[in-house]
Image (cartoon, grey):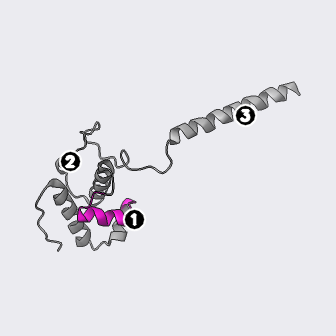
Amino acid sequence: MADETPSGGPLVQLTLALKNERVGRGLSVEDIARMVNIGAFHIERLETGDFSYLPPIYVFSYLRKYATELGVGDESLLASCRKELLLPESRHSGSTSTQDAAPRAGGSGGRRKLLIFSSLIILLLAIMLFSRIF
């Protein structure tokens, strides 16, 4: 099974290559899931070519993260996969960042940090003001 020859579109080629590389290295689905911080459920679905359960941008992000970890595929293959998923060209050409499209748990962390920082400044100013009054 590790010697399957990829045929078909770029997504089929990439998913077969990923599975073959994982199996060739003796890694379980759970092993690679931990390595790339993607749920085992997603890894299994990606390897079977079932992309219907996620928006295409997440599918691409997960595939790119998985491919980067195993050293499978190249920028040309990933660009072809992006095209097959009907995603627009990347604004960051040549970027291998895996965090630009992956779902984030915290939402807008920047706004929260700004709010906390602003609150601390106001608190500090209030303490300074009240210490001069009393």
Seen at 28% across and 51% down, the residue is 60
Seen at 18% across and 72% down, the residue is 2
Helix, strand or loop at label 1? It is helix
Q: Hey, what amino acid is under mark 2? A: Glu
Disc 2/disc 3 C-alpha distance (Å): 50 Å
x and y percent of residue 66 in the render? 30, 58
The mark nearer the N terminus, 2 or 3, is 2
Q: Hey, what amino acid is under mark 1? A: Arg
Disc 1/disc 3 C-alpha distance (Å): 42 Å
**Could you tell whether 53 is left or right of 118 in the image?**
left
Q: Which image quarter is the C terminus in? A: top right
99 in relation to 44, above or below: above
Disc 1/disc 2 C-alpha distance (Å): 24 Å
Residue behind mark 2: 75
Mark 2 touching mark 3, by CB under 8 A? no
Residue 70 among magenta residues: no
Residue behind mark 1: 34
**Could you tell whether 41 is left or right of 84 in the image?**
right
106 in relation to 124, above or below: below
Q: Which image quarter is the N terminus in? A: bottom left
x and y percent of residue 43 in the render? 32, 64
x and y percent of residue 72 in the render? 22, 58
Range of magenta residues: 36-52
The mark nearer the N terminus, 1 or 3, is 1
Q: Give the quadrant of residue 89.
A: top left
x and y percent of residue 41 in the render? 36, 66
Seen at 70% across and 31% down, the residue is 122
Seen at 23% across and 67% down, the residue is 19
The mark nearer the N terminus, 1 or 2, is 1
Residue behind mark 3: 123
